[in-house]
Image: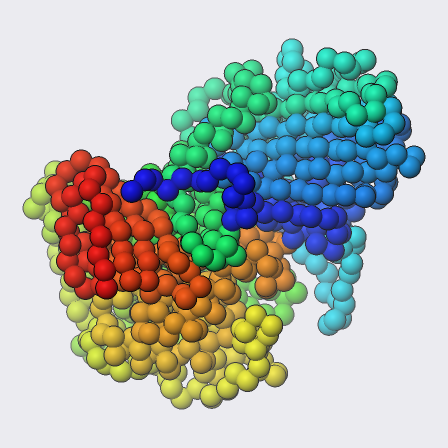
Amino acid sequence: MSAPTAPSAPDTATWTVVENSWDPQRANYFETILTVGNGRLGTRGSLEERHTGALPGTFLAGVYDDYDSPVTDLVNAPDWLDTEVYVNGTRLDPESAPITAHRRELDLRTGVLTRDTTFLVDGSPVLLHTERFASMADRNLCGLRITVTPLERAAGVFIRTGVDAHRRNLERLPAYPDGTTFGPDRKWDKWALSTHLHSTGSEQRGPVGLIGTRTISSDVAIVYGMRTDTDPTADLTRHHRGHERVSDEADFSEVRAGASVTVDKLVGIATGRDPGSDAEPAARAEATVLAAPGFDEAKAESVRRWQQLWADADCEIVGDDKAAHAVRFSIYHLLIAANPDDPTVNIGAKSLSGEGYRGHVFWDTEIMMLPFFLFTQPHTARSLLGYRYHTLGGARELARENGIRGAQYPWESADTGREECPRFTPDGQNRFYTRDEELHVTADVAYAIVRYADVTGDVDYLYGEGAEILFETARFWVQRCTRDGDRLVLHTVMGPDEFHSHVDNNAFTNRMVRWHLERATQVHAQMAQTHPDALAALAERIGLTAGEADGWADAAEQIVAPVDPDIGVIEQFDGYFERTVVPITEWDENDMPRYPAGYDHFTCEDTSLLKQPDVVMLMFVFPNDYSLRTRHANYEFYEPRTVHKSSLSPSIHAIVGLQVGDRTKAEQYFARSAYVDVDDNQGNTEEGMHIASAGGTWQIVTHGFGGFLATPDGLSFSPALPSSWDRVRFSVHWRGRTVRADLGHDDVLLELVGDGPDEVVTVWGERIALTPGTPATATR
């Protein structure tokens, strides 16, 4: 059984994202889905020359600023695509010259975006071809190729390309009467803007142009270095420097019909926050472009790294090209969202593809996205968890502000670990209580830490950074609970369902807290037995006593939480069953519920309506802790009450639905999750990717239809594929080795890769032994 690899052409249907014509109404949507990136940065798929209504952006992971905004923004960094092309004096852009043909193609296998646009200049066609990539081989490097071809008549060609440091973030749209809309040419113009960068100057060092900026409040230096390689037929080339721009120009007085001229640009990026970097950013940016080979060689090195990534990350659906494409599209965007080389950054709710949610980090990473990285890129998973250790100081500070010892992770975080969630909606009409009450994020972080250790066997991490987080956050829960007789309760919280605030004893939160305290107690006991010196050093550093750790076990036993099997329908929170039942009676074109008439996000408090899974999320997180009967009863009760106003929601319902036997709705929920950005089925993809949904989509295929589970006892597979699928193939990392799975409707082929003893796995309830290098087959 060979390793899954990206197929070669002509099998492109499931490996490419294509824009086949120019439509300004859809331009911002394509800017998002054609994003190129490498985890260090993401650059939206805007046209190099821009167009009226463009929403361009390059975002550098970890570069935040709050100088000119109510809360911290992920900074819209200098634009390395900045390009102008003139043919016989006419600028090639959608407004200045008619477009007769337009096609862009993002190759998911290689991360390369190519473009071919034919413009009419004085009635004669001219082809503009570009290629761009953000290197996976050197995450500090980007490349752009510009090729111009007069197709029928000789013409003069002028190309200017550079870096534009005059960038702004969107702030907010002024309040307009309900129903007010603006066309694509004006809608972004109406927004207020935030300034986060000031120029620190530009210079030319031989062939390299340098442009420097610095964030105003966070004081992060950003420097881009640029080198161009120009077709030798150019009559004249120039370097230009300005206050907020560096650029190179190439002038071709006459390019004959059918001939092409090319300018290649390589850009190196360095910041003052890059971990492990001692040299000044300007020196590092310059060194990156000077050390880079030519455009073709740099692209080839990046492509080779992409091939390695896909060998581990691919998830192949055989028999349904639309589904296969959507899953690979999701995986591509996950791969360009995370940086395995930087444990100080994480993935924002819109990844590095847009300004939505201001680039803030939520629980989405730990619950929705980490499983993909954990089972396909464990080193990256470790790096993502490193962010929570990096921001532990901010979590401690947040707990202190709330008068509690230990550490409390914020609902929305950025670079410091402080709470970044806004208090009010942009119009000031409604209060956000998520920042104050959605406390389960702290337990979600603990859950991810233990999950990582269970899957990888990385006890050094668990007993190091992991234990410090587990212990500090366990302290928080003990003090946040309130005594009620012989019980501990949690008052004034909000569960994953954000329609209901100020509730007591949310079932999901309380159960997560109980689990958290139990595992913190267990890790403390394990360290005392096997790593006493490490425990002693940690206890001294954070002032932890053995008696305090014993108190975690007592608190876990006393907290009100649904833990027994066969307990029927779990009340989501105290008093939920008394809320007014408001039936869902209308569904949209994607078969997703509409709000009942008269209701919206802020008017469902007194109803039984749910924004997204809450108790059902509990069934997802702890699939083995509740009997099938309990899971089925809760799914059947809560599913009809959920309006899925979060892109996280469909994937959870798909997976739990499959576990309890609801295959029809699972396929519906898969479509809602998998196509949320491919088909723009929420209508807001232009603001950035729904990256948590991408992680959920991978989980539906593997954990849902593939029936894959990983517990401390081992791996299991119970595939239940849709009838339109022939097979599903994917790989999972498990404790230092890889298991390749090829799953059909009635047969399973597995192969264990890596040295060591046999691994016993479960397939459709039967235990089988995998011997390294020897494929094993099981049938139903």
Q: Classify residue 146 as left or right of residue 304.
A: right
Residue at 52% in and 83% down: 584
Front-lying residue, 773 or 578: 773
Q: Residue at x 86, y 38 (%)?
A: 120
| Residue drawn at (68%, 32%) of the image | 130
For the N terminus, the image quarter is top left
Q: Position of residue 326 (x, y in %)?
A: 50, 54
Q: Return the residue nearer the eye: 100 or 95.
A: 100
Can residue 308 be seen here?
yes
Looking at the image, can residue 209 be seen? no
**Residue 314 pos. (x, y %):** 41, 45
Q: Quadrant of residue 442?
A: bottom left
Q: Is residue 364 left or right of residue 376?
A: right
Q: Is residue 751 left or right of residue 170?
A: left
Residue 135 falls left or right of residue 656: right
Q: Residue at x 63, y 70 (%)?
A: 429
Q: Position of residue 6 (x, y in %)?
A: 44, 40
- Specify the farthest residue to the left: 529
Judging depth in this view, the residue of 378 and 19 nearest the camera is 19
Determine the image quadrant of residue 167.
Answer: top right
Q: Residue furthest top?
A: 206
Camera-nearest residue between 63 and 417: 63
Which quadrant is the C terminus positioned in? bottom left
